Image: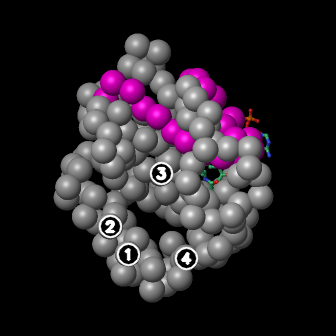
């Protein structure tokens, strides 16, 4: 099991079926899922039958990459998750970063700190050449996290969202950072 190293305040671990309640609760907050599903939650059935099996298969099929639970090191409190995953048809050396945190954890710099931890893991442990991240153009908080991590805007595009989300008419953005810029 290759996990990203702990950061100053956060530790990462793999998910297991014991995390079902945490994941259902995380997605039950419409503000958390606003820019992902337009505010719709994830049912327990989806978590048990699709989300967790997929994440667990990811650990086997893509060692060193994955979706990891983030906990505070001081109190082992679950604050949400981060992912680092190669694109479906993309090269292993260009993983995509993502994050979803509980609302109570917002505004403390955790997304930036965790993302930087995953970037360090990508470049130093996994030998990545480039890390990218995407979000809706109007998702200012997520864009700010990417910028604070040193990523720069690469392109604007229009993702094929399965949900209608307010602001999606403005399209999406991709940010990236390469190994040289990280160093
Ligand atoms: C996006 C998200 C991960 C940010 O987490 P966080 O821990 O609060 O992020 P950080 O504290 O590291 O940084 C957030 C930055 O965005 C800024 N910000 C927050 N809301 C903002 C807004 N509406 N407009 C502009 N900037 C905003 C903060 O001020 C901060 O920047 P600063 O340090 O320069 O002040 C969190 O809100 C979240 O999990 N949202 C729900 C899931 C989600 O949307 N995931 C991303 C999908 S692409």
Circle 3 residues within 10 Å: few <14, some 14–19, many ≥20: many
Residue 45 or 145: which is nearer the viewer?
45
Circle 4 residues within 10 Å: few <14, some 14–19, many ≥20: some
Q: Is residue 48 left or right of residue 106?
A: left
SS type, badge 3: strand
Mark closer to the chain start, 1 or 4: 4
On screen, residue 53 above or below 107: below
Q: Are marks 3 and 2 in contact (CB under 8 Å)?
A: no
Question: What's the magenta region?
Answer: 128-153
**Residue depicted at x 58% and y 58%:** 161
**Residue depicted at x 28% and y 66%:** 56
Q: CA distance from mark 3 to mark 2?
A: 15 Å
Mark closer to the chain start, 3 or 2: 2
Residue 135 among those drawn in magenta = yes
State the residue position of label 1.
50
Q: Quadrant of ligand 1?
A: top right
State the residue position of label 4.
42
Q: CA distance from mark 1 to mark 4?
A: 10 Å
Circle 2 residues within 10 Å: few <14, some 14–19, many ≥20: some
Circle 1 residues within 10 Å: few <14, some 14–19, many ≥20: few
Q: Which mark is residue 13?
A: none
Q: Which mark is residue 54?
A: 2
Q: Is residue 19 left or right of residue 145?
A: left
Q: CA distance from mark 4 to mark 3?
A: 17 Å
Q: Are marks 2 and 1 in contact (CB under 8 Å)?
A: yes
């Amino acid at each position: 099991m290759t996990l990203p190293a702990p950061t100053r305040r956060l530790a990462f671990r793999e998910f297991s079926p014991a995390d079902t309640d945490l994941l259902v609760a995380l997605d039950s907050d419409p503000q958390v899922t606003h820019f992902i599903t337009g505010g719709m939650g994830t049912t327990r059935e989806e978590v048990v039958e699709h989300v967790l099996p997929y994440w667990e298969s990811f650990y086997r099929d893509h060692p060193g990459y994955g979706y990891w639970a983030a906990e505070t090191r001081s109190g082992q409190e679950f604050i949400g998750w981060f992912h680092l995953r190669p694109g479906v048809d993309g090269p292993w050396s260009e993983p995509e970063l993502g994050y979803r945190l509980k609302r109570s954890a917002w505004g403390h710099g955790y997304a930036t700190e965790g993302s930087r931890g995953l970037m360090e893991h990508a470049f130093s442990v996994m030998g990545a050449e480039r890390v990218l991240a995407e979000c809706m153009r109007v998702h200012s908080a997520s864009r700010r996290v990417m910028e604070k991590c040193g990523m720069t805007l690469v392109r604007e595009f229009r993702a094929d969202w399965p949900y209608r989300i307010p602001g999606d008419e403005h399209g999406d953005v991709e940010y990236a950072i390469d190994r040289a810029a990280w160093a």
